[in-house]
Image (spheres, grey):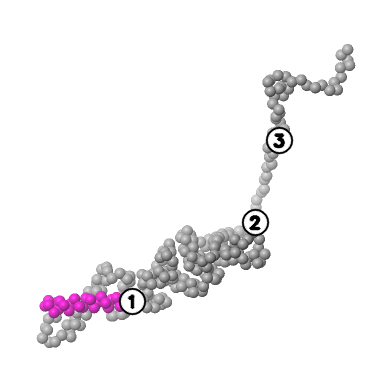
Amino acid sequence: MARFAYDPNRLNYTVQQQGREYQLRLAQRSQAIFTALLNLLASNYVSSVEGPSYTQEMKAVAVELAKIELALEDVNWDYNFGALQPDQSTRSDFIWSIIGYLVLTNNRLPPLVFDDLDFKNFLLSLINIYFIGSKPIAIQDVAALLIQGNVTVTEDFLLVRAGATGLDISDEFTFNIDILAPPGGGFPPNAMNVDATLRLLLSIVRPAHTLYMIRYIFQDQFLGPILDSVTSSLSSYYYDDFRSYWPGIFNRDRLGRKTNQAVVGEQHGNDF
């Protein structure tokens, strides 16, 4: 393969200089350098293959030069981070070690699965959002970067100015992120990892003195008329109280004796 030319058949573009593919490239490149070095020798050096001492020394030099060339070729793809063309693809390892390590806090990777191109686009978008500043639009863009839906950012102190109730001085530096999912879904199956990634990115973008609440709002689309019936039942516990004689056994005291009953207005005239 020509020097500093993109090889479409190459599989491994990592920063690690090892593996079968790298060893094959190293052998091919060192052999080409070794042949070029032999051609520079005087005519009295007649050996064309490795054997004599001077050819072994030149072979060792060719191998080291080949390692340097292969490393420089790989670095050549990394100079332009914004280029996303297939022939100018910055290596993901390089992106993470140089860009991701600086942008993401505490050396934490998002708990999501990316391929090379997706990870590159993710970091490019994150860098653009980062330089917007700690503004509501940046927070909204971070949420929209991960979730498909209508994202709204509201600040509580502005809600109070608009006449909202239920808030006090403790809500002065709080904001809310309302994510309205479209009807029929819209949230990814790995919603927990997306939520964790969103909170990780918010720690980068939001002002350090603020607090926030994330609210996921689901909605369903209703098609058709409402057909339903309403039933109700009423019960009163004190109804049973009226059927009971709370003082105890009727006409008996606590010792079980019959109690005297006062007779008032009873007619006994006919008994005499």
Q: List the residue tagged with mark 2.
A: 225
Q: List the residue tagged with mark 1.
A: 75
* Mark 1: few/some/many CA within 10 Å (<14, 14-19, 20+): some
Residue 25: within the magenta?
no
Res 118 quadrant in image: bottom left
User: Which residue shows up at 60% across the image and 58% down it?
Assistant: 222
Q: Choose mark 2 or mark 1, whichever is in front.
A: 1
* Quadrant assignment for the C terminus: top right
Horizontal arrangement in the rendering, residue 30 relative to residue 146 (left or right): left
User: Which residue shows up at 14% across the image and 87% down it?
Assistant: 42
Residue 135: x and y, percent? 54, 71
* Mark 3: few/some/many CA within 10 Å (<14, 14-19, 20+): few
- Which is nearer the N-term, disc 2 or disc 1? 1
Element assignment for label 2: loop
| Outermost residue, bottom side | 43
Residue 122: x and y, percent? 44, 70
Q: Choose mark 3 or mark 2, whichever is in front.
A: 3
User: Which residue shows up at 71% across the image and 22% down it?
Assistant: 252
Q: Choose mark 1 or mark 3, whichever is in front.
A: 1
